[in-house]
């Protein structure tokens, strides 16, 4: 069966402000300083599994030009622009609808556009097994990451380790971000995996699951499907999407559907969720600092300093994140870096704040 | 007797980097954001005591244009440019030499160009008493600040409180920056004053003291004096100054001379010694922050943030100093802010570091 990919690239990347802005978020940036954007890295790593003409990018209209610039070989019709963000269920449904409209069913890999995967060949082997499993019947395969420490920032998947289909196990349930204590228990039990947000299933399978568990979304997708190829295509898409409920695939489908399998992977996955990820990826100096760009230091420890051409001078700092851009500089304590969202909230309320978002 | 002032304005202001640069140091900046530079504030406050034509500014040749721009009414010949910094004794001797060359002795006030004085009329009353005392015989009057907390960053003056000349007492000795414990003892004793670095004495008195205690400096000053008004004036000044020993007036004269009086003052004096001074001068918000310029905050306490037009965004900071300029941003912990000097040392060694100094 044909293998396709749906790469979700509509996120705002707020946690990477001020490099990532609403006008050009994280997935379109070379945030890892490796010469390729996160979106490009995502496409690069799946090209051995899916042809470029079978890769679809779901994004927002305002990011279309980033996709065409960064992926010049991608067919323009494979850029699916959501008129508004409605979380992952409508997004995945939209991808499946377009794939099915091309005349044949396909096994689709659903991927984030802004994750890091260090061991790409191991990743592809895991995906190959997931693709095989998804081809059979109505199986939905969720890629779970074997945890190696008690992370409290991810959701977890509980699997039934007594039943195996190859390396996969049936999913018992999905659990939200746990407390430290629970996370330690999950790690010890061996039954839990991190929820990576990557799924593999047939386009027809996810549509049938939506018909059952998300009938309102399904009805909308049917209307969109009927419009494809007609002069009303964009108008219908717009009208339907704006009325669509906002619902995640985890909550709307995965937690309810049957035949869900978790396939564990250990391929150096990282969701690159905040500036703190830089210390897992970039080189660290003898004082445990990540230093990029024009920086001068008199005593700094455990800092992440991302400068550009302007000089950032650090004096006696410990555990501070500094990110410099032309018009704004972020200075935050690592322990409170998630409060960037609170900061952006304040900027949204400021008269001249829009220019920094 | 005529009253003159010598304002010492040759310092580098390193502790106020990156606003203060070698090319334009602190005394020529409106560091207090009050619309006047530190030098202008210094002149403003003594104009009721000395006429503009009797005010002399000792500085470096490269700062001459700042003095002429900031003090347009000051006679150009009152700008005394030292060919090289040789500490305070040669500087004060140079001032006295020029004053005496104009034909009559004068009582000179020796002042720093970068201190803050909150109660200016009290300051002037103290200076008037100092001037009277200095006019008599060979008295040298040093202005001591009545300490109100055990500061460890200043030198202290020990006075003999059993003998009084008006509000002044004879000086017993000068002491270097004390430990916390010693500073507390000094404060309790009532015998110690902070050494403000302000002196009042006749020009002839300080010259005679130099003849006695600093004969090498004195000999150089005599050669400079002989050159004044001749075509060789600048050449002699340059030649002599470069050979001059570097010595402070405290060490070279005050600690040895007799007839030294300490006159205590309580006029809201502050040496504005580092960025931390901003929290004593500028308004403080409900979280104990000093915030200037374009700043957005999500949780910050006890911070000093001096922004300009670029946005500085603070997230979860405590006790951090941020000073933004066009080409460099300082981010330092308040507890280690004196390490700016270490940072500048590093910059001096960097190939492109000169542009930031």
Image (cartoon, coloured by chain):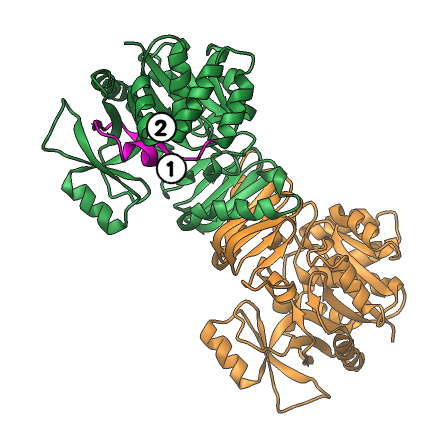
Chain colours: A green, B orange
Residue lying at 89% horizontally and 62% vertically, measured from the top left = B53
- The spot of residue B10 in percent (x, y) is 70, 54
Q: Which mark is residue A223?
A: none
B46 displayed left or right of A218: right
Q: Which chain does the residue under circle 2 lie in?
A: A
> In the figure, residue B155 lies in which quadrant?
bottom right
Out of A248 and A120, give the one closest to the viewer.
A248
Viewport quadrant of the N terminus of chain A:
top left
Query: Split into 4 quadrants, where in the image is the C terminus of chain A?
Result: top right
Residue B345: percent from the left, percent from the top? 53, 46
Q: Relative to the observer, which residue lies in front, A193 or A28?
A: A193
* Chain holding disc 1: A
The secondary structure type at the circle numbered 2 is strand
Q: What number of labels is visible?
A: 2
Residue B237 visible to the viewer: yes
Q: Residues within 10 Å of mark 1 (few under 14, many from 20)?
A: some
Task: Point out the stretch of residues depicted in magenta.
Answer: A244-270
- Please give the name of the residue rendered at 38% of the width and 16% of the height, measured from the top-left corner: A44
In the rendered structure, find residue A116 and report the number of the disc placed on it: 2
Label located before the other in sequence (2 or 1): 2
SS state under label 1 = helix
Rendering coords of residue A283 (x, y %) = 37, 33
- Residue at x 52% of width, y 80% of height: B186
Residue A277: give its label: 1
């Amino acid at each position: 069966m044909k293998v396709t990919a749906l790469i979700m690239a509509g996120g705002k990347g707020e946690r990477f402000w001020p490099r990532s802005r609403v006008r050009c978020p994280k997935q379109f940036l070379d945030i890892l300083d490796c010469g390729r954007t996160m979106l490009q890295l995502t496409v690069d790593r799946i090209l051995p599994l899916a042809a470029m003409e079978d890769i679809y990018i779901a994004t927002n209209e305002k990011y279309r030009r980033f996709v065409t610039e960064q992926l010049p070989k991608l067919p323009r019709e494979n850029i699916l622009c959501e008129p508004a963000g409605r979380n992952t269920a409508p997004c995945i449904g939209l991808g499946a609808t377009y794939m099915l409209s091309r005349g044949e069913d396909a096994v689709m890999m659903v991927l984030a556009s802004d994750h890091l995967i260090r061991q790409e060949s191991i990743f592809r082997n895991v995906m190959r097994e997931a693709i095989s499993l998804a081809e059979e019947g109505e199986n939905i395969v969720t890629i779970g990451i074997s945890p190696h420490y008690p992370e409290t920032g991810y959701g977890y998947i509980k699997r039934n380790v007594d039943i195996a289909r190859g390396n996969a196990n049936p999913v018992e349930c999905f659990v939200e971000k746990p407390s430290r204590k629970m996370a330690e228990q999950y790690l010890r039990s061996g039954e839990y995996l991190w929820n990576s947000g990557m799924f593999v299933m047939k386009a027809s399978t996810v549509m049938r699951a939506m018909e059952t568990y998300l009938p309102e979304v399904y009805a909308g997708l049917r209307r969109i499907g009927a419009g494809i190829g007609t002069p009303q295509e964009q108008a219908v898409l717009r009208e339907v999407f704006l009325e669509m409920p906002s619902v995640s695939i985890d909550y709307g489908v995965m937690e309810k559907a049957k035949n869900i399998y978790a396939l564990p992977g250990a391929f150096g996955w990282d969701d690159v969720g905040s500036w703190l990820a830089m210390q897992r990826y970039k080189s660290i100096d003898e004082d445990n600092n990540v230093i990029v760009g024009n920086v001068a230091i008199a005593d700094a420890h455990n800092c992440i300093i991302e400068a550009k051409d302007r000089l950032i001078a650090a004096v006696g700092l410990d555990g501070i994140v500094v990110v410099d851009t032309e018009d704004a500089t972020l200075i935050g304590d690592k322990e409170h870096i998630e409060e960037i969202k609170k900061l952006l909230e304040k900027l949204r309320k400021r008269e001249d704040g829009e220019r920094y978002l």
